[in-house]
Image (cartoon, rainbow, N blue to C red):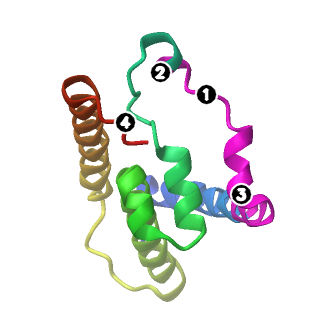
Amino acid sequence: MIMGVYNKTLYELGKWILAAVIAAAVFVWILGDSLLTHVPECAFESLTGLYCPGCGGTRAVIALFNGHPVRSFLYHPAVPYAFVVYCEFMIRMFLVKHFGVKSGKDGQINIFIYIGIGIILIQWVVKLILLIHYGVHVI
C-alpha cells in the first residue's frame, strides 16, 4: 500500500474540506467584509468578557481569503499555519497517490497538529495577558 490508512483517510477528508473552502471563498468574495456583520458574537466572550481560543479566527479566514496573509496571521496565527500545513499535506498525498512518489512522512501529520494546538494556546494566552493586564483589545 502506497499510502497509510490514516493518511488516506485524511486525504479523502481533505478533498471534502477543499470543496467546502472553495464554497466559503466564493461566499466571502461575494459578501466581502460585510460578512462580519452577520457573524454571531462569541458566546464565551459574551459570558466571561474574555477571549476564547478561537477569537479572531473568522476575521483571519476572511483576511486570508482576501489575500492578506499577514493580517490573517495577526488576527489568529493558527489559520495561515493550518492553510500551509493543509496545502503541503494535500499536494504530497496527491503525488503519492497518483504518481507513486514516496513520501517518507507517514504519521508525521500528528506533529503538525500538535504544533497547531500549541499555536492556538499560545496566541490565546498572549491575547488574554494583553486584555487582562494591559487593557489592550487585539481583535
The segment highlighted magenta reads 23-45
Amino acid type indicated by mark 3: Ala
Amino acid type indicated by mark 4: His
> Between marks 2 and 1, how big is the CA–CA gap?
8 Å
- Secondary structure found at label 3: helix
**Residue 40, placed above or below residue 14:** above
Whether the residues at callouts 4 and 2 have beta carbons within 8 Å, the answer is no
Residue 103 percent location from the top left of the image = 32, 76
* Between discs 1 and 4, the one toward the N terminus: 1
Query: Badge 1: few (under 14), some or many (20 or more) residues near its Cα, within 10 Å?
Result: few
Whether the residues at callouts 2 and 1 have beta carbons within 8 Å, the answer is yes
* Between discs 2 and 3, the one toward the N terminus: 3
Disc 2 versus disc 3: nearer the observer: 2
| Residue bearing mark 3 | 24
Disc 1 versus disc 4: nearer the observer: 4
State yes or no: residue 124 in magenta. Answer: no
Point 49% across, 88% down: residue: 99
Whether the residues at callouts 2 and 3 have beta carbons within 8 Å, the answer is no
Can you tell which mark lies on residue 45?
Answer: 2
Q: Nearer the viewer, residue 46 or 82?
A: 46
Can you tell which mark lies on residue 137?
Answer: 4
**Residue 4 visible to the viewer:** no
**Residue 136, placed above or below residue 71:** above
* Between discs 4 and 3, the one toward the N terminus: 3
> Between marks 4 and 2, how big is the CA–CA gap?
12 Å
Amino acid type indicated by mark 2: Glu
Can you tell which mark lies on residue 41?
Answer: 1
**Residue 22 visible to the viewer:** yes
Q: Nearer the viewer, residue 131 or 66?
A: 131
